[in-house]
Image (spheres, rainbow, N blue to C red):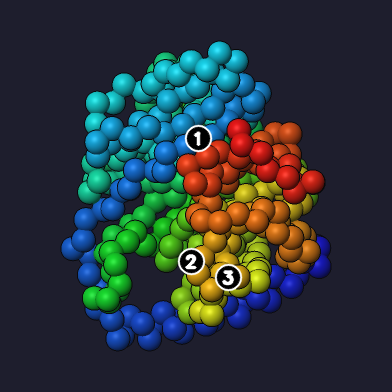
Amino acid sequence: MRVGRILSIAVVSLASVIVIAVGAIALFFFVRSSSAKQQNFAPPEGQQAISPAGNTILFSRGSGSSSFLYRKNLSDGSSVRLTSASTGIESEASFSHNGKLVVYSFAGSPDSKSTVWVVAADESNPHALTGKDEDAQHPVFSPDDSKVFYATSSFTGHYAPEVRPARHNWDVFSVLVQSDAIPAGSTATQVTHASFYDMRSLDAVADSVDQGGTRLLISTSGYPIGDLIEEFSVGSAGRDKIFQPHVPGESSVGPAYGEARFIHRGMDILFLAASDTSGGDYDHNVYSMSEVTGSEIKQLTHLKGVTTDLRVMPNGKATFVNGGTAFVLDVDTRSAKPL
């Protein structure tokens, strides 16, 4: 057992006690309201994902209150719609590791529940993987592309009048898929039983210790501890690790994270974090840290404004969107260039 894992188990135990105790107090003082509708927002204009071969990108394009996914061929610059939906919000697209499939989340309207869909990369056989009542988001393929992991929210609303309505009570599920983009006919399997208060991203990697196993990485928050990056081994009970890296200029109330992704075969973690080093608005940049120890934190970009859509490519580089422009990040040299 690695030292990092031993340390994190102790942190998990302490964090669990704090969360349970404070959660009980919060439920005593606050009356939960679930009358609010869903909130689905069109993703920022820009690339959402790049194919494993690096020759195709998916990007979002707004159309009124809708937003659709397009596939762009980088060799000739041509673009085509990935789906044929007439209205709705398509987002969070990801390629399978073999490049044959695309998974994405879809909401029929800004106030409807979200579903997870899979479609072949050539636009054929689009199918919903989740039911209309699940409210599913954050889809990602398993390391062997045999299944899709996704998260569902079982409650939308607020715990106090001064808090904006949002999705809460998240957990992760998995469902089998076939290489032709048709669901394998099996029911979904619940993977976690954590009821996360919030969820910003979900990622999966092959377990380097348990051959054939899978590890999940989740960016979330736990009151009153703040934003966290949590790791799970699929099939094991409870959290495997909890990380809370600190960056210069973070908020006085605690760190604020965006997406978190495995890199270097799961030995390191890339994550987005907010910082204010100039006394103005918070900037969001890409950082890395060791998955083994949770230390060795490095700032990889120095950009202004909001950074989103952090993804890792098979060649060990990463992509992200800042100011509506997609960038490719060389993690080793810490250099980022427009895509």
Secondary element under disc 1, as helix, strand or loop, is strand
Residue type of the residue flagged with mark 2: Asp
Give the left or right position of residue 287, taking residue 254 as reference: right
Residue at figure coordinates x 57%, y 67% from the top left: 275
- Of marks 2 and 1, which one's residue comes earlier in the chain? 1
Residue 127 is situated, as x and y percent measured from the top left of the image, at 37, 26
Residue density around tag 2, few if under 14, some if 14–19, many if 20 or more, within 10 Å: few
Residue density around tag 1, few if under 14, some if 14–19, many if 20 or more, within 10 Å: many
Image depth: mark 2 or mark 1 in front: 2
Q: Which residue position holds label 3?
A: 278
Q: Is 303 in front, or is 107?
A: 303
Q: Is 59 in front, or is 91?
A: 59
Q: Quadrant of the N terminus?
A: bottom right
Residue 61 is situated, as x and y percent measured from the top left of the image, at 37, 32
Residue 14 is situated, as x and y percent measured from the top left of the image, at 60, 80
| Residue 103 visible to the viewer | no
Residue type of the residue flagged with mark 1: Gln
Q: Is residue 174 above or below residue 299?
A: above
* 3D distance between C-alphas at marks 1 and 3: 29 Å
Residue density around tag 3, few if under 14, some if 14–19, many if 20 or more, within 10 Å: few
Secondary element under disc 2, as helix, strand or loop, is loop
Q: Quadrant of the C terminus?
A: top right
Q: Which residue position holds label 2?
A: 281
* 3D distance between C-alphas at marks 3 and 2: 8 Å
Q: Which mark is residue 47?
A: 1
Image depth: mark 1 or mark 3 in front: 3
Q: Is residue 9 above or below residue 90?
A: below
Residue type of the residue flagged with mark 3: Ser
- Of marks 1 and 3, which one's residue comes earlier in the chain? 1
Residue 314 is situated, as x and y percent measured from the top left of the image, at 70, 34
